[in-house]
């Protein structure tokens, strides 16, 4: 690809991220209320961006078919919001999106790339029957079955009562609520409560922030608490997600809880499952520019230590190891019978930064002696994987570029020193050029600094984007809502504690040979996601490193 073309693509993406794409409907009169549809669009893979524009075009077409007869006489506006580094949390995107609102904006419909609007007319009719003056938001409610670290152990004594929205199914906000929320989230607002410096699940953190910081304007928003709620509190002065029967996890019909009847309510907003299919390795697909990736193209660097050799490694060998031809166990002790490779770094309880860099150095030396390896995946010795699903996921990315994939977390994203990183237990995927870049420019402030956070911090400083892979999971299946796991076939889970790992592998990861995987991509999907690396003379020193991050003190360890 010529350099001038890369520059043009980069400038187009920059302008798109800053401005987005907006289309306004025909005005219905000076006093008409406005409905704003926002489509949050990630940078990659290309199929996600195509989903954003397909939704935009579908809305525009449905609007034209209304032929000027719009329920509620609403003025309609559609906007694609291209993701900036912290916009994925939704909370941190709000202050920048207030420019889209005006005094007449009554409703905001928040969508993602895989949200489907089945009937714009039906959706507007539903909005017309709801109260736009109430500080409220509507969606498909998810619930935790137990207290989980991915939600910061919120309401740990009774987590089952607290609803949070399925973002991919769409969320409807009143303008009243969104204005108040955006004002509170703005960096200048010092009185807002955030329970953690870590961003993990945008949906739950949004719902909890609203619950903790906002109250209804009028008695219309008051709600009795029939199930107790959090200890010592009631829901009388709280705003919680309102379940809307017309917002569904999939394209099914729901019964209406409001009417108490079995009359079906059509799903007007729902999430489209991201269906996976393994790409066959044929001459035709190669001529089309598609790159077939299998487990033999991936090098698995597995972090372990002596005390877990007998407990954890046999589980890996009985499950996903059969699909992972190039796997190496890196430990503090070399044990020939397994075998494990000694990193020369003593084991520590948390952090592992020095150990991880040593693993990358040893792995790269090992990879040089082998052929056809395109990717390196760092995993823990208590990580379960579907190698076929991972392999097919990687078809959508160019292994010759600087690609950094994983389950994305954020640290202090509301502050100037914030950054994104991929959490280690879910597995971190690096293209080989990126491995070399890390070894050339990244270093550890201390041996026990949090390896995944230091890696993310360093790569952000180098201009490499942390790209999320929805199927990778830092925790166990029971730590996630079932709707999420069914919409996105899982690629990994982490932690054997209180689970039967071999059952988890068979139940959720397909078992050996039974995996389905992600849609494949053409050559146009494989674009550069990182700018040119700055001309650094040696290892990147991190002068702006957040206080406490130089050791394991700040590590969110699962």
Image (tube, rainbow, N blue to C red):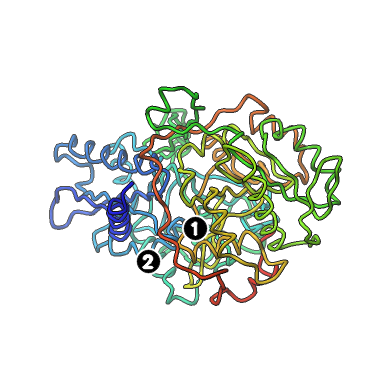
Q: Position of residue 196 (x, y in %)?
A: 59, 66
Tell me, for residue 319, which label it has, or none. Answer: none
**Hey, which quadrant is residue 70 in on the image?**
top left
Q: Residue at x 74, y 45 (%)?
A: 382
Q: Is residue 187 above or below residue 124?
A: below
Q: Left of 457 or right of it: where is 304?
A: right
Q: Left of 28 or right of it: where is 412?
A: right
Q: Quadrant of the C terminus?
A: bottom right
Q: Residues within 10 Å of mark 2 (few under 14, many from 20)?
A: some
Please, what secondary structure does the residue beneath circle 1 have?
helix
Q: Position of residue 84 (x, y in %)?
A: 40, 59
Residue assigned mark 1 = 206
Q: Is residue 544 above or below residue 391?
A: below
- Please tell me which of labels 1 and 2 falls first in the chain: 2
Q: Position of residue 272 (x, y in %)?
A: 43, 35
Q: Residue furthest front?
A: 369
Q: Residues within 10 Å of mark 1 (few under 14, many from 20)?
A: some
Mark pair 1, 2: CA separation: 14 Å
Tell me, for residue 95, which label it has, or none. Answer: 2
Q: Is residue 329 above or below residue 96?
A: above
Q: Residue at x 42, y 37 (%)?
A: 270
**Hey, which quadrant is residue 437 in on the image?**
bottom right
**Mark 1, mark 2: which one is toward the viewer?**
2
Please, what secondary structure does the residue beneath circle 2 have?
helix
| Front-most of residues 171 and 197 | 197
| Front-most of residues 266 and 129 | 266
**Hey, which quadrant is residue 231 in on the image?**
bottom right
C-beta proximity under 8 Å, tags 1 and 2: no
| Front-most of residues 260 and 506 | 506
| Front-most of residues 102 and 24 | 24
């Amino acid at each position: 690809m010529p350099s001038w073309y890369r520059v043009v693509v980069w400038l187009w993406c920059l302008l798109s991220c800053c401005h987005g794409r907006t289309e306004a409907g025909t005005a219905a009169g000076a006093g008409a209320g406005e409905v704003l549809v926002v489509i949050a669009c990630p940078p990659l893979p290309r199929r996600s961006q195509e989903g954003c524009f397909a939704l935009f075009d579908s809305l525009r077409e449905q609007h034209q078919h209304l032929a000027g007869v719009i329920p509620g006489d609403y003025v309609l506006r559609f906007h694609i919001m291209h993701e900036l580094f912290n916009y994925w949390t939704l909370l941190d995107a709000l202050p920048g999106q207030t420019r889209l609102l005006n005094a007449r904006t009554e409703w905001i419909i928040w969508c993602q790339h895989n949200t489907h609007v089945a009937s714009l007319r039906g959706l507007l009719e539903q909005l017309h029957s709801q109260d736009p003056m109430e500080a409220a938001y509507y969606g498909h409610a998810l619930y935790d079955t137990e207290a989980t670290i991915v939600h910061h152990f919120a309401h740990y004594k009774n987590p089952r009562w607290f609803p949070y929205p399925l973002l991919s199914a769409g969320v409807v906000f009143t303008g009243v609520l969104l204005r108040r929320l955006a004002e509170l989230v703005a960096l200048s607002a010092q009185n807002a409560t955030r329970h953690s410096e870590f961003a993990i699940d945008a949906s739950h953190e949004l719902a909890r922030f609203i619950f903790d910081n906002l109250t209804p304007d009028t008695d219309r928003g008051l709600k009795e608490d029939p199930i107790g709620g959090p200890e010592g509190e009631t829901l009388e002065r709280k705003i919680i997600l309102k379940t809307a029967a017309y917002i569904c996890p999939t394209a099914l019909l729901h019964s209406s809880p409001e009417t108490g009847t079995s009359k079906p309510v059509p799903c007007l907003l729902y999430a489209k499952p991201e269906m996976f299919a393994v790409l066959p390795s044929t001459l035709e697909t190669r001529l089309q520019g598609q790159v077939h990736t299998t487990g033999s193209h991936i090098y698995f660097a597995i972090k372990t230590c002596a005390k877990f050799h007998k407990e954890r490694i046999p589980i890996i060998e009985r499950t996903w190891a059969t699909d992972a031809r190039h796997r190496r166990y890196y430990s503090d002790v070399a044990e020939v019978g397994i075998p494990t490779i000694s990193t020369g770094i003593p084991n520590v309880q948390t952090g592992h930064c020095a150990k991880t860099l040593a693993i990358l150095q040893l792995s790269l030396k090992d990879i040089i002696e082998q052929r056809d390896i395109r990717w390196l995946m760092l995993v823990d010795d208590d990580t379960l994987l579907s190698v076929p699903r991972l392999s097919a996921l990687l078809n959508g990315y160019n292994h010759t570029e600087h690609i950094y994939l994983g389950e994305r977390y954020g640290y202090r994203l509301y502050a100037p020193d914030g950054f994104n990183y991929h959490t280690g237990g879910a597995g971190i995927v690096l293209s080989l050029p990126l491995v070399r870049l890390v070894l050339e420019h990244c270093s550890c402030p201390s041996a026990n600094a949090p390896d995944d956070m230091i890696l993310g911090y360093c790569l952000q400083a180098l201009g490499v984007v942390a790209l999320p892979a929805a199927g990778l999971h830092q925790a166990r299946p029971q730590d996630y809502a079932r709707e999420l796991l069914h919409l996105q076939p899982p690629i990994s889970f982490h932690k054997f504690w209180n689970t039967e790992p071999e059952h988890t592998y068979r139940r959720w990861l397909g078992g050996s040979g039974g995996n389905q995987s992600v849609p494949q991509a053409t050559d146009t999907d494989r674009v550069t996601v990182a700018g040119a690396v700055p001309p650094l003379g040696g290892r990147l020193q991190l002068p702006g490193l957040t206080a406490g991050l130089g050791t394991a003190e700040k590590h969110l360890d699962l």
